[in-house]
Amino acid sequence: MFRRYTRALTCSYVGLVPEPALLTTPQLARALGLSISSVRRYAAAGQIKPELTTPGGHYRWSVESVRQQLRELQQRTRNDG
């Protein structure tokens, strides 16, 4: 009986684990299907901006914000070309 209860409890909570609000650069790259170097290159060119820069100089990203920035970049590129 204890096993059945544990299994049901575990299964019911699997989809409820929230994603972290801010991602590291490798996590962002994975979420977007890009390479880490591509994310860094976009950031260095000013094409995407992080939500936060840590005191150590590391970026923290909001995946939804970056998706929006990339959509806007794509639209600007279409309109210019």
Image (cartoon, grey):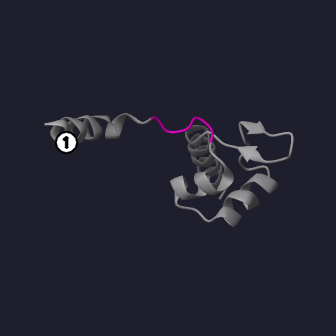
Q: Which residue is mark 1?
A: 3
Q: Position of residue 33 (x, y in %)?
A: 52, 60
Q: Which sits in the foreground, 58 or 4? A: 4
Q: Local crowd at mark 1 within 10 Å, few (<14), some, or many (≥20)?
A: few
Q: Magenta span has 60?
A: no
Q: Which sits in the foreground, 30 or 47? A: 30
Residue at 29% x, 39% y: name it: 10
The part of the image, by quadrant, that contains residue 41 is bottom right
Assign a secondary structure to mark 1. Answer: helix
Q: Is residue 38 above or below residue 5?
A: below
Residue at 67% x, 53% y: name it: 25
Going by the image, does 76 lie left or right of 59?
Answer: left
Q: Position of residue 4 (x, y in %)?
A: 16, 40
Q: Which sits in the foreground, 7 or 78? A: 7
Q: Is residue 53 above or below residue 77?
A: above
What secondary structure is the stretch in magenta mostly built from? loop
Residue stretch in magenta: 18-22
